[in-house]
Amino acid sequence: MECRNCGSSLDPRINYCPICGAKVVRRRLSLRNIWNDINEQFFNLDNKLLKTFNHLFIKPELVINSFIAGTRKRYISVIQYFAIGLTFVGLQVFLMETFFADLINAESTFLEGLNDAQINENNPFKDTSNNDFNKYLSVVYTLSVPFSAIATWMAFNIVGERRFNFTEHLVLNLYYSAETIIISAIVTITLLCFRLDYAIISISTGLFTLIYFYYVLKRVFKATLLQSIAYFLLTMVAFGVIFIVILLLMFILGFIYGYFIK
């Protein structure tokens, strides 16, 4: 008997390949077998997806530090979990465009006063709808991760906390981003079902991502209250600087393109 995944010879009494870790499949494919696999992977209370989600929310240092230390079987890997997060984004956008388009593009009672401000006369994005932005949520989330990793790496290097290299900061930010993406998607769709103001939902989920980010930094680096506040604020400043630099580069490139190429 040999493994159907890696071709290694197997003892017929074992259920998992000792080389690649794949489950030994002895039964013919059927709908019942497929359902059992889905139940085992996603709905079993002991499965890795729920465990990763739960531990990232309650004690994120277990998931992040374990992966960085080399543990790979206990939780879903960082790339897989981020891919699951992007899947939730796609589902969120689909549901919003299909069932909640009226709420997404409706005039927000919470922000309607801002629409009469004089500054909107010169706002180049004043005709952009929420749906236009939501279509690119996956791209926004994906591009934000490396910049967030640069910000945490810079901030912690400034204060002399060099326990993690840049790649390990990237792992931290990928896990953090995936968790906030999944929670924000679930909360957003749930609250939209109750016809809540989309602007209020967006602001609430935005505040949650900031609070959770502070919580992750505090738990992962085992910081005191004052240290974690300092880490958080310094990271926000670093991210702001990176954002401003990117805007300036985009402005310069746009100027060069418009002046010399056009």
Image: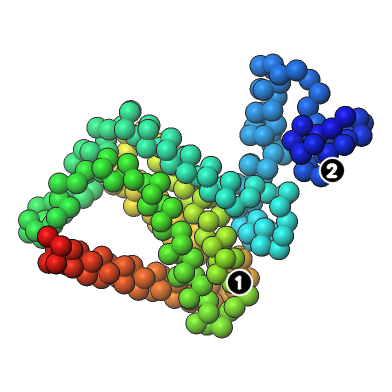
Q: Residues within 10 Å of mark 2 (few under 14, many from 20)?
A: some
State whether residue 233 is above or below residue 175.
below
Q: Quadrant of the N terminus?
A: top right
Residue 223 % position (x, y): 60, 73
Which residue appears at 27% of the width and 69% of the height?
249
| Badge count | 2
For badge 2, the amino acid type reads Pro
Residue closest to the eye, 158 or 30: 30
Disc number for residue 18: 2
For badge 1, the amino acid type reads Phe
In this rendering, position of residue 130 left or right of residue 119: right
Residue 85 % position (x, y): 50, 45
Q: Which of the two labelled residues, at mark 2 and mark 1, occupies the earlier sequence position?
A: 2
Quarter occupied by residue 121: bottom left
Which residue appears at 80% of the width and 36% of the height?
7
Quarter occupied by residue 28: top right
Is residue 109 at all visible to an observer of this figure?
Answer: no
Disc number for residue 164: 1
